Image (cartoon, rainbow, N blue to C red):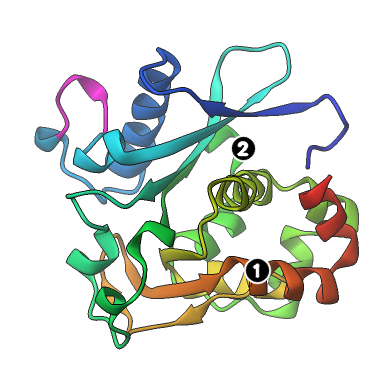
């Protein structure tokens, strides 16, 4: 999933690993300082973290040979805390009747400013429509598409879901990111209306097996990299 086989490395962070401190610092920069989604007074010490972090599997990406974390995402698993999607969104699907142990929620996607493009920001963070022209500007060819840091982190989430036997992935996403994922073959279904939560976003649900089958059909090359 990197620009070359050795340019980036994707890491699943063990619980309690000091690398988590870098995760929280990067999230603070993105969610507090750059995007203003979280209040600084709620996150002392320049670290953005919450109660869900202790019930999550965390992933990071670094340039190979460097220690600096340039991207992160987490998958929240079932616990007494529940899932953020239930707290912040109006859901049109009753999750309580489903096997909660089979859920994972994608959350706190953050990429270092040095590795984000302005056009990428407008899609990942906001509601800007992903027009064909904007898609070409973001991903000028298949190589850049396969190399995207975000897709690499999503690969980690998918592989972890398979390993844990999770059946469903939940996510609260901006419309632009959903459209981007759909364009490359990763399909989620909306399960509620858009609401103002870290910007205007809507709740989504994807069945892992179905998502991978759809990815295989729509984008065999990316599927091979996901499963490789």
Residue 138's place in the image compared with 61, above or below, is below
Q: Are marks 2 and 1 in contact (CB under 8 Å)?
A: no
User: Which image quadrant: the N terminus?
Assistant: top right
The reply, left or right, for residue 31 in relation to residue 13 is left
User: Is residue 164 or residue 141 the one in the foreground?
Assistant: 164
Q: Which mark is residue 209?
A: 1
Percent across and percent down for residue 202 are 37, 76
Name which residue lies at 37% across and 74% down.
203
Of badges 2 and 1, the one in the foreground is 1
Which of the 4 image quadrants contains residue 120? bottom right
- Report the residue marked by disc 2: 115
Indicate the quadrant where residue 48 lies: top left
Percent x, y of residue 109: 46, 47
Residue name at image x 79 percent, y 37 percent: 2
- Name which residue lies at 59% across and 66% down: 208
Write the start and end of the magenta stretch as one range. Answer: 43-48
Label 2 crowd (10 A; few <14 / some 14-19 / many >=20) = few
Does label 2 or label 1 sit earlier along the sequence? 2
- Measured from the top left, where is residue 75 in percent x and y? 44, 47
What is the tally of numbered marks visible in this picture?
2
Q: Quadrant of residue 153?
A: top right
Q: Is residue 204 visible?
A: yes
Viewer-side residue, 181 vs 45: 181
Left/right of residue 138 with respect to residue 99 in the rendered view: right
Q: Is residue 23 above or below residue 193?
A: above
């Amino acid at each position: 999933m990197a620009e070359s086989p050795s340019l980036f490395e994707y890491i699943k962070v063990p619980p309690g690993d000091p690398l988590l401190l870098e995760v929280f610092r990067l999230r603070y920069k993105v969610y507090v300082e750059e995007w203003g989604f979280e209040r600084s007074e709620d996150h002392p010490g320049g670290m953005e973290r919450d109660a869900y972090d202790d019930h999550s599997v965390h992933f990071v990406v670094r340039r190979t040979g460097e220690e600096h974390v340039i991207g992160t995402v987490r998958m929240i698993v079932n616990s007494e805390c529940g899932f953020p999607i239930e707290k912040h969104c109006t859901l049109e699907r009753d999750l309580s009747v489903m096997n909660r142990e089979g859920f994972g929620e994608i959350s706190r996607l953050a990429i270092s400013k040095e590795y984000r493009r302005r056009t990428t920001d407008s899609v990942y963070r906001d509601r800007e429509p992903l027009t064909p022209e904007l898609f070409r500007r973001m991903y000028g060819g298949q190589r850049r598409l396969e190399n995207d840091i975000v897709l690499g982190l999503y690969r980690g989430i998918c592989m972890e879901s398979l390993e844990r036997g999770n059946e469903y992935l939940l996510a609260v996403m901006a419309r632009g990111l959903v459209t981007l994922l759909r364009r490359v073959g990763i399909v989620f279904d909306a399960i509620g209306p858009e609401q103002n939560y870290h910007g205007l976003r809507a709740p989504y649900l994807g069945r892992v097996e179905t998502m991978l089958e759809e990815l295989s059909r729509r984008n065999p090359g990316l599927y091979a990299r996901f499963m490789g």
